[in-house]
Amino acid sequence: MTAQYYRNQDAFILAYDCMRPKTFQSLQNWLDDVKENANTKNYVVAMTGAKADIDRDEVDKLQIRDFFE
């Protein structure tokens, strides 16, 4: 994604697929892109898991908690 999409943004939403751990693992790359390309330090980052309503989560809940610590 080009840096212009990160500029002057107040918030970023990072999404992953609860059924595909690889998508969760790539969140760190997206967060690094935000930190590198956002031209303001006053932004909010939110994370959401798609398909969270399915009982068979493939991403460990401890990994999710630890991601933002």
Image (cartoon, rainbow, N blue to C red):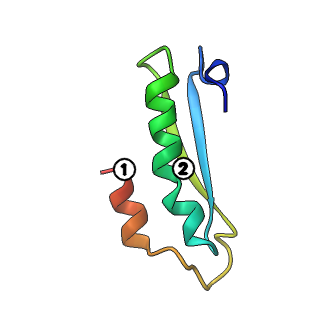
| Residue 17 numbered tag | none
Residue at which label 2 appears: 47
In the rendered view, would you say 9 is above or below 61?
A: above
| Position of residue 34 measured from the top left corner of the image (x, y, whole percent) | 50, 31
Mark 2 neighbour class, 10 Å CA radius: few under 14, some 14 to 19, many 20 or more: some
In this view, the residue farthest toward the bottom is: 56
At x 50%, y 37%, the residue is 45
Mark nearer the N terminus (1 vs 2): 2
The residue sitting at 49% across, 46% down in the picture is: 29
Q: Residue at x 59, y 62 (%)?
A: 23
Residue tagged 1: 68
Element carrying mark 1: loop
User: Helix, strand or loop at disc 2?
Assistant: strand
Left or right of 11, for residue 17: right
Three-letter amino acid code of the residue under disc 1: Phe
Q: Position of residue 67 (x, y in %)?
A: 38, 55
Question: What amino acid type should be assigned to the residue bearing mark 2?
Answer: Met
Tag 1 and tag 2, C-beta contact below 8 Å: yes
Split into 4 quadrants, where in the image is the N terminus? top right
